[in-house]
Image (cartoon, helix red, strand yellow):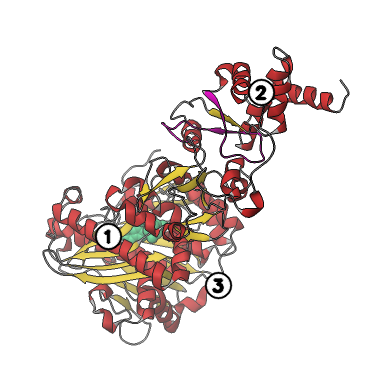
Amino acid sequence: MTTTDTAATTQPFQAEVSELLNLMVHSVYSETDIFLRELISNASDACDKLRYEAIARPELIGDGAPPKISIVPDKKANTLTVADTGIGMDQKELIDNLGTIARSGTKAFVARLSEAKDGAGLIGQFGVGFYSAFMVAERIVVTSRRAGSSEAWTWSSSGGSGFEVAPASEADARRVARGTEIVLHLKSDAAKYLETYEIERIVGAYSDNIQFPIELVPEEGETRQINSASALWQRPKSELKPEDYAQAYKSIANAFDEPAMTLHYRAEGRYSYAVLLFAPSTKPFDLFEPARKGKVKLYVRRVFITDDADLLPAYLRFVRGVIDSEDLPLNISREMLQNNPQLVQIRKAVTTRVITELEQLAEKEPENFDKIWDAYGAVIKEGIYEDFERREKLLALSRFTTTTGERRSLKQYVADLKPNQTEIYVLVGDSIERLKSNPRLEAARARGIEVLLLTDPVDAFWASMQLNYEGKPLKSLSQGDLNFDLIPLLDEHTKDKTEPAADEAATIALIKASLGDRVDDVKASTRLTTSASCLVAGNQGPDRALERILSQQARGARTKPILEINLRHPLVTAIAKTEAGSSKVDDLSLLLLEQAQILDGELPEDPAAFAARLNRMVLLGVGAS
Ligand code: ADP
Ligand code: MG
């Protein structure tokens, strides 16, 4: 590129931006109002940044003018201007911030947007805020001066494929003494945004809780402040109504939905701080992206410091809101925050409090808790794996789909144990439907034993940790030996009268010899009643489901499984009756192994050989061979 510092340059948008703008211009959204909220949110961020940087460099607010936001409608010019006296942007920042989308997941957003009915709900989550202004503007001119800089720059674009960046004209540079001015040349159908009552309505609905004064500069009459600019979390709970919280949630979390849980309290004592946290009711798209972080904002005495301080553990990364400390030094650097002992304490206490709140919600408002569990259960369960200290609590909080078909807690499970049942049984797999027909459930089903059916990826990890709940070990049905002998069969399953294969040991030895080193061992199964065979992991080492995940991620080789066989199954008794040395023994044994693999959703090692073997046996059976 031939950018020199003073020449005007025309630059292409990053491909994703062009795509996005295309969607914006053809207005996928019916709710165009949100552009104003996005611009105000950016202006507020810019004011926050200025206030933070000015702690170390007070000269940045040299003139003493406090950061604020102005909205100026101009019917004659058909423009709406949103200006702030925040941190501003220099030439490079204008190009980088308003020419690309740095966030990951943008492609996913664009893809989803074209199929989504409710596109507006996605904007805040994907951080494409600024570009939403192209829904209402045919041309946008941004003039900005970084705080402390001697130069101002102008960015302009009519959407399409590119934008222009040039030094600001003398008049523009004089007007924009610090911060950013965004002039929207409105489309013909967007004239309503020039009406002061429209502007007040939108600010009232979405941005009332912005910390900085938002001034409306009407064409006639006095400039007036149109938001309350108070830190809602500092106000006593008794003064606040549910609507106040819902509104605060929208402006703090930049969200459109309603909070499924609201937690507001003030901690006094060794450290004092105010906490206002929300659990959104809609699941964000990027909950499982590695880069996704928690979004709890740290304030110190009402000054925003950072939203990057890991104030809650990763398994609570869906929580949004504010923690405002009275005691931390204002000039604490973001690096120092990492190991600050006070912050470690706050994090610990707030984490515990959030979990307590979830427990109470589960008890008092189970419907709301269910919503949270639907959206974030898979994330919260990461805590069982990661948070040793709160493992018990998180296990108790968790809800599981079980073979009863209901969503159950471990407390409920333990209350309904069968006579002599001492373990909590779990089975990990890809889908509830597939798990329901899993042969490993047969013996449990014959006894009416409830089994937790686990299908989230994280389940394989914590289910392999040999955990206990109230002294009852969690036991996977695809791992190790099982003993159901003491648990009575249900009436309709009176003990199977079929004779097992005549000589158990000899039959097992035959199969073992045929399978060679394909398996670690062959055993008589205690978990099958109708199926012929299944695979299990040894008592030690990872469970089958975990091994599968790890090997898919190329993070570990697979160990050899144990093949369990049902000695009463005709296929097995057939082996016992086949004369030794016959190739049929090999075929039947391999089929026992291969069908167990298929039942696990895996391919036989050699699918072609499997097909040939199956055909041989079928032809034998129909007497065609
Ligand atoms: P987001 O706010 O989620 O980062 P936006 O598209 O709303 O995404 O804004 C993109 C970036 O442009 C912001 O992150 C910020 O760096 C910059 N920006 C936008 N508006 C302003 C402003 N008024 N003052 C300073 N920087 C701004
Ligand atoms: Mg934004």
Ligand 2 placement by image quarter: bottom left
Dot in front, 1 or 2: 2
**Residue placed under numbered mark 3 in the picture:** 188
Any mark on residue 352, and which? 1
**Residue placed under numbered mark 2 in the picture:** 589
Residue 149 in picture, x, y percent from top left: 22, 55
Q: Mark 3–mark 2 contact, CB under 8 Å?
A: no
- Using the numbered discs, state the Cα–Cα distance from disc 3 to disc 1 in whole angstroms: 53 Å
Circle 2: element type? helix
Residue in view at x 36 percent, y 60 percent: 319
Decide if residue 496 is on the left or right side of residue 58.
Answer: right
Point out the image quarter for the C terminus.
top right
Give the quarter of the image for residue 564: top right
**Residue range corresponding to the magenta coloring:** 521-543
Q: Which residue lies furthest to the right in this view?
A: 624
Residue in view at x 47 percent, y 55 percent: 417
Judge by depth and name the residue closer to the eye, 211 or 618: 618
Up-down relation of residue 164 to residue 550 (above or below): below
Give the quarter of the image for residue 26: bottom right
On the question of residue 361 being in view, the answer is yes
Decide if residue 589 is on the left or right side of residue 294.
Answer: right
Three-letter amino acid code at the position of disc 3: Ser
